[in-house]
Image (cartoon, grey):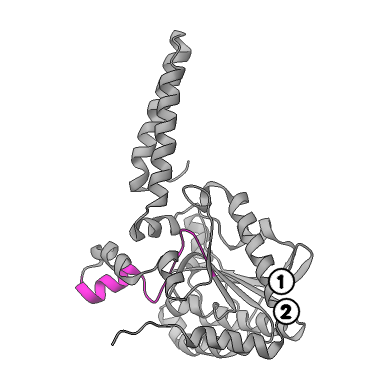
Amino acid sequence: MTTVLDFEKPIMEIQEKIEELKKISMESGMDLNKEIETFEQQAEDYKKDLYENLKPAQKLQIARHPERPNFLDYVNNICTDFIELHGDREGMDDRAIIGGLAKIDGKPVMIGGTMKGKSTKENLEYNFGMPQPQGYRKALRLFKHANKFKMPIVTLIDTPGAYPGISAEQTGQGIAIAVNLREMAKLDVPVIAIITGEGCSGGALGLAVANKVFLLEHAYYTVISPEGCASILWRDASRASDAAEALKITAPDLMKFGIIDGAIKEPLGGAHNDYELVCSEMKKTILESIEELSKYSAPELKSQRYDKFRKMGAFLE
């Protein structure tokens, strides 16, 4: 059964009325088609208006929807011949980051990203999408492999942040992310990053130093989670909706600030409603980006990537 978010409940109430009218019509033989059509139009109009005018806190809920596609869902729908590669070559692996070789429309790519589960068991396996240092080291190993063989790199990011536990600190979380930032900036091949759900802090940025950065329509990208921000600013995590508004975490604001290059359209209501449609849009964006960036030389790609990130930040005097 599809999870219904709080702000979607009025839609479900209209749908229940429609089903009730259909049942009455079938059992009694009464012609209620006109009434049913009226309610169906009401539901459609309400949904369209709702999803076109979502507040940041509502987009936050969609980005975290438990049935939202995860990394392997995207790979299985966009790629062929995916071969997963394991290990950081220092004796460790991390299931929160998955990556490997694949083809998109016959074009070889290295694709990697954070992985979330859809059940408690799966989320425990993937550490709720929070990578450990070995995950970032594994990702960098794959990026360097792609660099050696001149393959474009695609990263798909959905993480509440890097794992903040003691084990991560003991094995070098901060330095692992910092090294990724430095080394990704130096790659000679096109790098395309897509935030597919949550894109929080250095945990997301450690995979997103890219020539092109895109956001799914209802995803978000931020330096800190709204709950974390509210806890620091107001000592009250329940003010997360206020923080989400202030942080400017959604696609329109991020495009205005030059943080992302574009937003990828989602099905009405969110990516979880139509995997095939959102994957089609994502695949189109990836292929167009690869075609555009393939015209650049290695020095031009590095220069474009460097300039892109150096220009970020708006200042008022």
Residue corresponding to mark 2 = 295
Q: Give the total of numbered labels.
A: 2
**Residue 283, picture quadrant:** bottom right
Query: Magenta includes 219?
Result: yes
Q: Which residues are magenta?
A: 214-235
- Give x and y (percent) for residue 269: 46, 48
Amino acid at the residue labelled 2: Lys
Q: Nearer the viewer, residue 115 or 90?
A: 115
Residue corresponding to mark 1 = 291
- Give x and y (percent) for residue 234: 20, 72
- Give x and y (percent) for residue 203: 47, 77
Residue 95 visible within the image: no
Q: Is residue 236 left or right of residue 226?
A: left
Question: In the picture shown, does residue 238 fall above or below 52?
Answer: below
Q: Residues within 10 Å of mark 2 (few under 14, many from 20)?
A: few
Residue at image point 63% right, 50% down? 276
The label on residue 307 is none
Dot 1 lies on which element? helix
- Give x and y (percent) for residue 178: 50, 89
Screen quadrant of the C terminus: bottom left
Query: Magenta includes 33?
Result: no
**Residue 252, picture quadrant:** bottom left
Dot 2 lies on which element? loop
Q: Is residue 182 left or right of residue 79?
A: left
Q: Are marks 2 and 1 in contact (CB under 8 Å)?
A: yes
**Measured Cα–Cα span from mark 2 to mark 1:** 7 Å
Residue at image point 58% right, 70% down? 113
Q: Nearer the viewer, residue 8 or 252?
A: 252
